[in-house]
């Protein structure tokens, strides 16, 4: 009987080892890498080189800008879709499946799909030419029009990753007993008031999860940007990649990684602080 | 204040008929209990009156307004839900104030009403708490206070005490009774607990399989059940039903003849008699019949006897000092003014003529 007490620990051991090996250790390695020089001495040289680089300011700017635009857009859209789904009874599953299809598409594939639309001989130009709006194919994704690349990335990311927010919110909505909304209705709340005063506050835990997850992933945006804009729209994860691969400088690449980590941690703490629900424990 | 009137309500879920043409009137300031076994359609009827569910047929009137087509918020009702549905993200104060906020009540009125409702329910010291910090009984009170604070014309309650433990239920039952007698709100109260129904109601509507089978004052429902279902459902232990042969205008139990106040529908008739309306004797008495004791259960205030008479089983409650053993034959004297006669084929009560 005594040995049963160890079973839970034995059972979680593989996953703990796995996490230590594949997350904690590389994380530590990256941190060390970023604060050590080529001779192994402690230094801030990597961070200084990173900050002095031509692309650094733009990378920070575009990464944050993309996050600030994409995440709220996704949350609002997913929330709208999830609420609409709640009002459907017939064919509900069909909508659920169709709306979650993008979940199965990798980010690079998504980038390429949107590249096929925006490229010089792409669907957008063919369409606009077809209806006679333009005579010549337009160059949409050029370094001269970074805002256009920016919008294309936003479109691709919204298309690709809204589904995960949607799934989290649908699951969250299903956890809210319908009696809360009905009680609000009986006591005089109109549909909008029910949404703002009851559904939304009760959905806070799910919203928090979705926001944290999407913000962290948005801060790491890379493949879609590379596919659509190359380095014409610099982002932090992309810079880490270029420094590691093209410049063969793991130290500066690690510094970028640490910056992304730092912003992610700050964002997560902010979400946890600002969205802390007042109710203590579950209802 | 207002009356509630429902006319011919029919409701089907898929192929299942939950309500089969229910009509019911609750008078102004009356406390009516909807009583019936689980699944008989009580909640469905309540939700239709509240407007949370749409009936296929029939109308709902509150006061002199036909509210059948109105959304819940326009019906001027308040409801206490079975699982309370107290908002977990709002304090007790804000929960109670919810309806008033929706009505955009003036701040002074809001505060006054919330405090009055909280005082009535003895939760005035919990106003700043969140529901997660409350016990089941306290949440229950918040749900009732939230309903009372809006001063509704009509109060609907769906098994509000069913989630409480026995002791608390007893206590809350008495409190609710006092409270609603004071506030004189027209109330429709759902329960499957017959003791609760008897204790609270001005009138009880007994429901079964989507029908209202009897609608009368508690003692009437108890003593003069409309059919075998009501007699069996209300009372613990339930009413005894004995099938007896008929001779002219008399029914016979062994050598005892009982006068029938009506013509019998056939060669046999069903006698309904409550266990406490059978007086027991160890020696033969006039106006009594013999029965063999199968089981003796001492329940404290009385003994519960399970007996058989011929092939039929029956129960009797006798004083605790009644000396009796299993296997013994005793004599039972039915109280003549407490007998109910029913048609054995339909189970419906026969009316005196
Ligand atoms: N939304 C629904 N869908 C399908 N069947 C339902 C629904 N609501 C109630 N029913 C059925 O209708 C019957 C009556 O239910 P209800 O009114 O909740 O009974 P009660 O409150 O008396 O226990 C039950 O058999 C129940 O299964
Ligand atoms: Mg019910």
Image: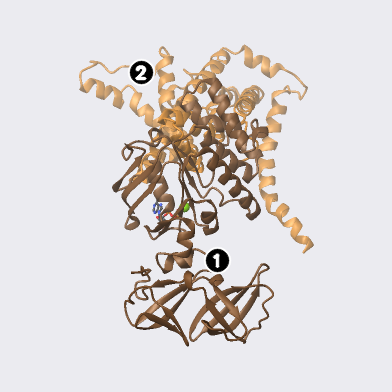
The tint of chain A in the picture is orange
In terms of secondary structure, where does tag 2 sit? loop
**Label 2 Cα crowd, 10 Å radius (few <14 / some 14-19 / many 20+):** some
Q: Which numbered disc covers residue B236?
A: 1
Q: Is residue A173 left or right of residue B7?
A: right
Q: Quadrant of the C terminus of chain B?
A: bottom left
Q: Is mark 1 within 8 Å of ligand 1?
A: no
B13 or B60: nearer the viewer: B60
Q: Residues within 10 Å of mark 1 (few under 14, many from 20)?
A: few
* Ligand 1 quarter of the rendering: bottom left
The image quadrant that residue B350 belongs to is bottom left
Q: Is residue A45 above or below residue A25?
A: above
Residues at badges 1 and 2 in contact (C-beta under 8 Å)? no
Is B145 on the left-hand or right-hand side of B27?
A: right
On the image, the x and y values in percent for residue B179 come to: 57, 41
Label annotation for residue A140: 2
**Taking B180 as reference, is A249 above or below it?**
above
């Amino acid at each position: 009987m005594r040995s049963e007490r160890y079973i839970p620990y034995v059972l979680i051991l593989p996953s703990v080892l796995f996490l230590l090996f594949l997350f904690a250790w590389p994380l530590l390695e990256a941190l060390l890498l970023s604060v050590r020089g080529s001779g192994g001495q402690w230094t801030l040289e990597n961070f200084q080189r990173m900050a002095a680089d031509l692309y650094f300011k733009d990378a920070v700017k575009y990464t944050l800008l993309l996050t600030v635009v994409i995440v709220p857009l996704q949350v609002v859209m997913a929330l709208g879709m999830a609420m609409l789904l709640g009002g459907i009874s017939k064919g509900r599953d069909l909508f659920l499946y169709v709306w979650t299809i993008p979940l199965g598409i990798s980010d690079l594939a998504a980038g390429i799909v949107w590249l096929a639309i925006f490229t010089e001989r792409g669907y957008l130009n063919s369409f606009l030419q077809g209806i006679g709006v333009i005579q010549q194919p337009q160059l949409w994704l050029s370094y001269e029009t970074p805002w256009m690349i920016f919008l294309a990335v936003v479109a691709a990311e919204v298309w690709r990753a809204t589904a995960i927010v949607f799934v989290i919110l649908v699951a969250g909505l299903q956890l809210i007993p319908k009696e809360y909304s009905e009680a609000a209705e009986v006591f005089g709340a109109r549909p909008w008031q029910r949404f703002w005063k009851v559904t939304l506050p009760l959905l806070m835990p799910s919203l928090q999860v979705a926001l944290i997850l999407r913000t962290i992933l948005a801060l790491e945006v890379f493949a879609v940007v590379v596919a659509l804009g190359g380095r014409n729209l610099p982002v932090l994860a992309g810079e880490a990649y270029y420094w590691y691969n093209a410049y063969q400088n793991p130290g500066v690449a690690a510094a970028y990684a640490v910056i992304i980590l730092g912003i992610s941690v700050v964002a997560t703490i902010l979400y946890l602080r600002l969205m802390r629900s007042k109710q203590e424990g579950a209802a | 204040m207002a009356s509630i009137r429902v006319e011919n309500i029919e409701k089907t879920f898929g192929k299942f008929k939950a309500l089969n043409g229910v009509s019911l009137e609750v008078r102004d300031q009356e406390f009516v209990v909807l009583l019936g076994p689980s699944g008989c359609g009580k909640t469905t009827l309540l939700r239709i009156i509240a407007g949370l569910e749409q009936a296929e047929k029939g109308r709902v009137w509150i006061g002199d307004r036909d509210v059948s087509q109105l959304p819940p918020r326009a019906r001027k009702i308040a409801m206490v839900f079975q699982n309370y549905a107290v908002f977990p993200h709002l304090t007790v104060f804000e929960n109670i104030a919810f309806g008033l906020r929706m009505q955009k009540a003036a701040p002074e009125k809001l505060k006054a009403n919330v405090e009055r409702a909280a005082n009535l329910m003895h939760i005035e010291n919990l106003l700043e708490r969140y529901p997660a910090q409350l016990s089941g009984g306290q949440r229950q009170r918040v749900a009732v206070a939230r309903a009372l604070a809006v001063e509704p014309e009509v109060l609907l309650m769906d098994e509000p005490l069913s989630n409480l433990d026995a002791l608390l239920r007893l206590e809350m039952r008495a409190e609710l009774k006092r409270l609603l007698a004071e506030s004189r709100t027209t109330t429709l109260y759902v329960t499957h607990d017959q003791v609760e129904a008897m204790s609270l109601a001005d009138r009880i509507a007994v429901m079964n399989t989507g029908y209202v089978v009897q609608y009368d004052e508690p003692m009437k429902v108890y003593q003069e059940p409309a059919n075998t279902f009501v007699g069996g459902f209300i009372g613990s232990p339930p009413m005894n039903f004995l099938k007896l042969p008929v001779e002219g205008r008399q029914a016979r139990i062994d050598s005892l003849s009982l006068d029938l106040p009506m013509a019998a529908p056939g060669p046999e008739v069903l006698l309904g008699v409550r266990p406490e309306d059978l007086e027991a004797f160890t020696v033969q008495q006039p106006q009594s019949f013999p029965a063999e004791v199968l089981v003796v259960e001492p329940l404290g205030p009385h003994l519960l006897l399970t007996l058989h008479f011929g092939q039929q089983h029956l129960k009797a409650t006798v004083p605790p000092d009644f000396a009796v053993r299993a296997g013994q034959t005793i004599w039972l004297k039915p109280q003549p003014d407490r007998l109910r006669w029913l048609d054995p084929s339909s189970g419906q009560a026969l009316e005196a003529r």
